[in-house]
Image (spheres, rainbow, N blue to C red):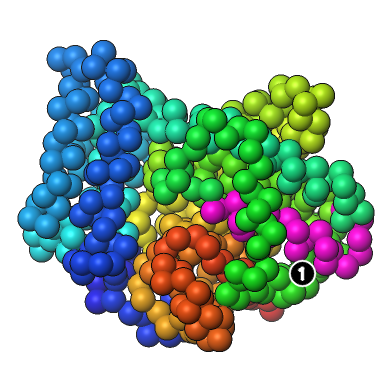
Amino acid sequence: MFPSITNNNNPLPNLPIPPSICSTEPGTWAYDTMSRRVDAEILQRTWDDNQHHWRQWSTEHIDVIKRFELLRNELQNAATTPLQHLEKPVITSSQREKEYQEWQQILEPYVSNKDTWLTAPWMVTEFLVYRKLMQAIGYWDPQSPGYQQDPFRAQKQAGLHSSIASAESVLAKLFYQTPEVFHEESLEAGLALATSIALWGNKMDLSLWPADKEHRNSDIFSKILDQASQNLLHDDTQVLRHHCQMLKERGGGQVDIIVDNAGFELVTDLALAHYLIESGIATTVTFQLKSHPTFVSDALEKDLLETLAYYEQLDAAEFPACHAAGQKWRHFLKEGQWKCHEDNFWAQPYAMWDMTEPLRSDLVQRCDLAFVKGDANYRRLLGDRIWDYTAPFQDVVGAYFPCPVCALRTLKAEIGCGMDAEQVNRAQELDDQWMVNGRFGVVHFGTGTHEREEHSKARNN
């Protein structure tokens, strides 16, 4: 079993922790990803989108093309290429130094062991691809033409522009066709709809299904939403509702959304945050975002701000719901009801029980509920390890997470927990790709560690 890579004293799952997933077994999603997909699909598409700029960028100071080709060569020979430490970057702040040192710590056991891109844990190597891509373009080097340049911008833009038709339908349904959901005492209909929209929005993942500009006016998502309930393998919506009811009754809480993808999925996260504020469940929603481009479509703060700007300038006659939502979202941000926080932890391969400081203490002390979005974040909740599919989510995740947590995930990797056995059997019979194609989903709730309550009790004694 690979060791905890932070050697901290954080709480752990209640159950024995399984070994990390590696990418050595042909026929698995991990093997296909690291031996083929990241190079042949993701980096090839990245090259196609950026080669014109990179040819102009390649100077004596930083040859982006050469660095990029070296990374691709490593991945094309993933089975025999040992991992290496990152180059020491141009340090511009204590935060950059901290991030670099954390990666040194992450990689040290695998570099020392001469592990390859396939024998090291899959989560480590997959995140490393994107961190090395940032190194190749000089993302943090103020002297590089690639400074703060997102190599996935073209794909994110396509995802944003193609989101409109589905978004208009979804936003109209949530906010205008059923306005009573904001005022119902039970929260039942509104919370179920808002979480379902946010859950199935994760099906629109640019790293798996690139956006098509030609489908700007095609409402693809409504078809997905119509099939939502029959594709849930576990549903804790009622437990979540009781927790949200408690927050509402005490005047609203501090809710975080640990964001996954930009594009249409981000719009569904904004819709969830909109509902949380308007319904009184939350006084403030904090969006937890990546600190650098990762996994193609993963959202940065600038992606969120660009989404708001794009939606509020849409033609109110053609897209009235999107336009009105964009204006309202701008208001939430201006009034401090919405906040953005980027953190390096979200772009690193740590298991979430190894959450770094000061992020973990902030969640303990401040956050009343965290929604964890997407498959990569879910994999980290599970430490990217093979648990029994029916192992209780509370024992695997709720036992260690620093605050109450709700995971909204469509399945895109061969791991899981907390699923109902009969539903798993049904999914296996319906679809032999049920674990990886995003067809099925889960809504999981865990209580968290109750550390805030314990600290409060200790202060009062």
What is the crowding at mark 1: few (fewer than 14 residues within 10 Å), some, or many (at least 20)? some
- Given the image, on which type of amino acid does mark 1 rest? Arg
Residue drawn at x 40%, y 29% is 150
Q: How many marks?
A: 1
Tell me if residue 54 can be seen. Answer: yes
Direction from residue 317 to residue 145 in the image, left or right: left
Observer-nearest residue: 359 or 235? 235
Give residue 215's position: percent from left, percent from top: 57, 35
Q: Where 133 sits versus 429, above or below? A: above
Give residue 363's position: percent from left, percent from top: 58, 58
Q: Where 291 sits versus 148, above or below? A: below
Residue drawn at x 26%, y 13% is 56
368 part of magenta stretch? no
Q: Which residue is mark 1?
A: 241
Direction from residue 127 to residue 268 in the image, left or right: right
Dot 1 falls on a residue whose secondary structure is helix
Please name the predominant secondary structure of the magenta segment in the image: helix
Tell me if residue 455 can be seen. Answer: no
190 part of magenta stretch? yes
Residue drawn at x 58%, y 46% is 265
Give residue 8's position: percent from left, percent from top: 36, 67
Q: Where 56 sits versus 300, above or below? A: above
Residue drawn at x 91%, y 64% is 185
Give residue 421's position: percent from left, percent from top: 53, 86
Quarter that holds the C terminus: bottom right
The magenta-colored residue range is: 182-203
Observer-nearest residue: 166 or 156? 166
Q: Where 358 sits versus 315, above or below? A: below
Direction from residue 391 to residue 45 in the image, left or right: left
Quarter that holds the N terminus: bottom left
